Image (spheres, rainbow, N blue to C red):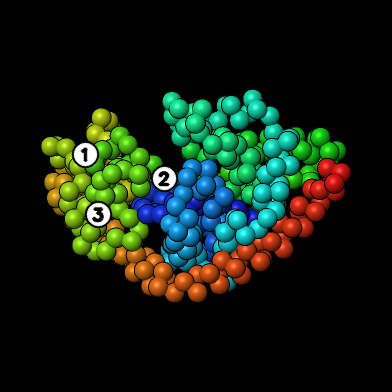
Amino acid sequence: MNKKIFSGVQPTGNLHLGNYLGAIKNFVELNNQKDNECIFCVVDLHAITVKQDPKELKKNIRETAATFIASGIDPNNSIIFNQSMVSAHSEAAWILSCVSRIGWLNRMTQFKEKAGKDKEKASIGLYSYPVLMAADILLYDATHVPVGNDQKQHLELCRDIAQKFNNDFSSPNFFKVPEPLIQKQFSRIMSLKDGTKKMSKSDPSNLSRINLTDNKDEILNKVKKAKTDPLQMPENIKNLIERPEAENLLSIYSSLKNQNLENSVKEFEGKNFSIFKEKLSDLLIEKIEPISKEIKKLLNDEQYLDAILLEGSNKADKIASKKIIEIKQLVGF
């Protein structure tokens, strides 16, 4: 069956190894499967749910598009666009927010995590952005959406919204109810300085993450300084219990090599961390350095990136504007 795939990445700058292994690497593999129709969105409307510097946001939109292309997504074989250039996203989000229920949104755990204790000061956009995410997906009749664990709940909400709209307006199958695409053999990528915390661009220490713009020397230095423990490499998976740093580094190695964690443990059992770190550095340089060089090259050609985003937005607009007209007709506008 042909899959129609929609996914988006927020243009928040400093995309790192966690973003690559958790999402972008998977996008490239999906894009390379000839039967798939892929739409990749730079979700800049989602980015402004928290305050952004306008100049930085513009730069980050281009950097996200450059990262897609540098990682291997061919704009000739897929649509790459930024959300704010297609007005149907905002229109559909409002209509779908009138179908959604407050009780559904109150169950969204990610809002609680992002808003923290001071949720009264969080923006309404941060609270309701899962409805915009649903609009993003449903406008394109996407059949499948690549999701990580942190987005599974939002996709469930999208499915609920689609089914309620179809029922409310007596239009069975008007919105396709999308299926999740969950990566196999993928582990959450954690900080290089603390294996219990997710790798994040907001971490004050640059040594905590491998940025996709890091060069060879930066990668070598970060792996060398990555936190480990005093023991040798584990002899089996059970030995990884209560060894979060060892597990994280082995998970990174496994994800880059497309092999399961068990095989990686077997490859290095009983060896010193220095031997493993050398191999991990070589692998990271092999996979990440070409992407880093290409991102920097693309960022020097802003006109090219803007042209890709404009062309992609025009293609996306043709699909989304047709769907929003049909939505309006069903609603009674």
Which mark is first along the chain, 2 or 1? 2
Question: Which disc number belongs to residue 186?
Answer: 2
Q: Residue at x 12, y 37 (%)?
A: 230
Q: In terms of depth relative to the viewer, which is nearer, 59 or 152? A: 59
Query: Is 122 left or right of 253, judged from the image as shown?
Result: right
Q: In terms of depth relative to the viewer, which is nearer, 184 or 167? A: 167
Query: Is 70 left or right of 310, judged from the image as shown?
Result: left
Picture coordinates of residue 298, whole percent (x, y)? 42, 71
Which mark is first along the chain, 3 or 2? 2
Residue type indicated by callout 2: Phe
Distance from Cα at disc 2 to Cα at disc 3 = 17 Å
Q: Are marks 3 and 1 in contact (CB under 8 Å)?
A: no
For residue 13, what is the image quadrant?
bottom left
Give the residue pinned by disc 3: 280
Q: Residue at x 62, y 60 (%)?
A: 85
Question: Which disc number belongs to residue 234?
Answer: 1
What kind of element bears circle 3?
A: helix
Picture coordinates of residue 256, whole percent (x, y)? 35, 54
What kind of element bears circle 2?
A: loop
What kind of element bears circle 1?
A: loop
For residue 310, what is the image quadrant?
bottom right
Q: Which of the two marks, 3 or 1, is nearer to us in this view? A: 3
Determine if residue 37 is in view.
Answer: no
Crowd tier of the residue under label 2, counting other residues whose Cα lies within 10 Å: few below 14, some 14–19, many 20 or above: some
Distance from Cα at disc 3 to Cα at disc 1 = 16 Å
Q: In terms of depth relative to the viewer, which is nearer, 317 or 235? A: 317
Q: Residue at x 25, y 30 (%)?
A: 242
Crowd tier of the residue under label 1, counting other residues whose Cα lies within 10 Å: few below 14, some 14–19, many 20 or above: many
